[in-house]
Image: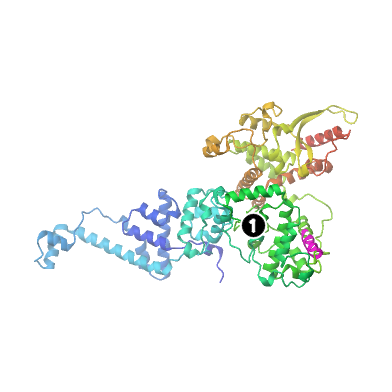
Amino acid sequence: MKLDADTARARKLGIAHFAFMRALVQGIALREAWDRYLQVEGLATDLRLVKGTIDWIRDAFAAAARREDRHGTARLILMDVRRLPDNEPAVPSLEDFAAERGLEDFSEAEQIEAFEAEFGKASVRQGRRAKLIARQLDALRWLEQLVAQPPRAGDAVAAWLNPNVSGRLEAVGIFTLAQLVERINGVGRNWTASIRGLGTAKAARVQRWLSEHQASLGLAIGGHVALARGKVFRHELQKVVEPATDVRPLEKLLVPAELDGRAGVYRRPQAQCLMTARNDYEAILTWLRSKNGASPAQQAQAKAKRRGRDLGVESALDWLTTLSHTQRAYRKEAERFLLWAVIERRKPLSSMTTEDCTAYRDFLGDPLPRSRWCGQRNRERWSPLWRPFEGPLSAAAQRHALTVLKNLYAYWVDKNYLMGNPWSGITVPRSALPKMNTGRSFTMAQWQFICEQVDMQRERSTSQRLKLALSLLYATGLRLSEAVAAKVDHLQWVEYPPDTEDAEHVEGWLLNVVGKGQKLRQVPVPVDVVGLLADYLIARGLDPDPEAGVNQGAYLLGKAADLEAVAPSLQERHGDDPKHGIVANTLYDQLKRFFEECGRVLDSLGHAKGADRLRRASTHWLRHTHASHAIARGTPVQIEKEILGHASLATTSVYVTTEEKRRMKAMASFWGKT
């Protein structure tokens, strides 16, 4: 019988709950008992939390007793013996009383008569209270045997953790204790960084609780979690996930002998092969090495740095950590296909048929199950959160994958490793017409909502940077890498007087951008965005005039200018040079968090679909949004291609000035209508 979601999420009772209640019944101080047994629930100083938790435990105990038709036990459990009057003087035992009064030679009945004559009803009340405590302790022991259970890896986080904590974990897709441990091990010390409202104190309590239940969970938190990321050696990170025949990066995949291709159906004899590779795995590595790699100087630098950090620990596959961009792109596609062939198809790559390849092409359009194959972008390869896919591949990405795999098999055929290429003739259908990917852009209404939300940000240097970045990326369509590389002195004011083709005087700001392939282009920037930049420069202690000499070398997007106030420890690490810029990941993460927050706000307003789009948004959505909105407002497509850097500028042509003027006018028309 399959349990529904509510049943699976229902709070469970563990031995800690019973130990805590026994401690209270026996008179141990509330705070001491709480800190000893239930610290994971929160702070003992939060009296509302403590009272609510105790009430829930009592109700859960009573409900369990009623299910067993022990209604008297249920009533007994609900009694709070701490509230029974206990202000009578201490009463000695009958034996101690008799010895003190010299009544040892009297009968027990006479001793009792004298005892009650002196202490009266106090002894009766204390005796009744002691019996009640004993009955409650017996009831708790009976209930513990009946309902107490240890935490298991597959249990819901809501079943064991405080709703305030479990709700925040579920909001980021962590639903089970196994997923929680995977998240902690997969990210490391700062695993709560992107989980709103879950700070270091709560994280520490959760980690402590998980460690206490390591045996029943069958899961352990790695030692690397206790250290800052920069202090963990690379070879230590590599131990976080053990090699296996499962979804693993290429360097950690164990391919069984029957699937490694040494006896592949379409293999040529080894004696005729131009490679020494004995199996498909080794043949992939040979193919990767044949591609243009990092320069010897880059490899030596990376190796020297690694040796210093890892005390000389080396591996035969260390060269995979210094691949060029091309090699990394090729490795990704070969790695994906190898994993699918071994795990899903249970066949070697050298036994793949055309039908297998067609099935893999279809798989690329929807990698299922998602939990096995898909994960978040940029998870490091050592992490248990790493997955080969983020989700379904677009048609363009599928075409790229097929191109790479055709290249792999063509190489093998050329080297006499295989007798034929099963990818020949397999294609991905192209769209009838090229079109903008509007699925990754904001609507006009969503963009207006984003602008309203950024205006509500707290006044900090990072919020100023956020506002400038949003406006800049939307107005210009810059790539993330181009935005963080842009400097103030890359801006220039230009004026175009009337000429024979256009009687209008045009002026404005241009930003010199070095894009892909080191190609230079000039992108118009609206005056109001430069106005935001001027305010931002003042906040950083720089001159508001972009062309001022003191701004030479200053980045458009700088580091937080108020670190001394908000994070003194970071101030010492990063210094206070107002000209310093930020890395791409910093801006990406800031915008990603902002879009997720916008999604939560929109969700609270009842717009679930729009909220989901905002939560999925990234920096590249702004580039798509710029293009789609500009074209929708009448900007010629050819001009948009030039603005986005999809074509080079004819800088030596006599028509350059005219072309720049046309672009400036077209963009001014777009800005004026937004």
Q: Is residue 23 located in the magenta-colored stretch of the structure?
A: no
Q: Is residue 520 left or right of residue 539?
A: right
Q: Which residues are magenta?
A: 404-414
The front one of 589 and 196 is 589
User: Magenta stretch: dominant SS?
Assistant: helix
Q: Which residue is mark 1?
A: 375
Residue 95 shows up from this direction = yes
Crowdedness near tag 1: few (<14), some (14–19) or many (≥20) residues, C-alpha within 10 Å = some
Query: Which percent across, then down, holds residue 200?
Result: 50, 48
Query: Which percent across, then down, holds residue 127?
Result: 23, 62
The extreme right residue here reads: 500
Residue 267 shows up from this direction = no
For the C terminus, which image quadrant?
top right
Query: Which percent across, then down, holds residue 202?
Result: 48, 51
Q: Residue at x 73, y 44 (%)?
A: 623
Q: Amino acid at mark 1?
A: Gly
Query: Which percent across, then down, holds residue 383?
Result: 60, 56
Q: Residue at x 26, y 62 (%)?
A: 130
Q: Is residue 405 located in the magenta-colored stretch of the structure?
A: yes
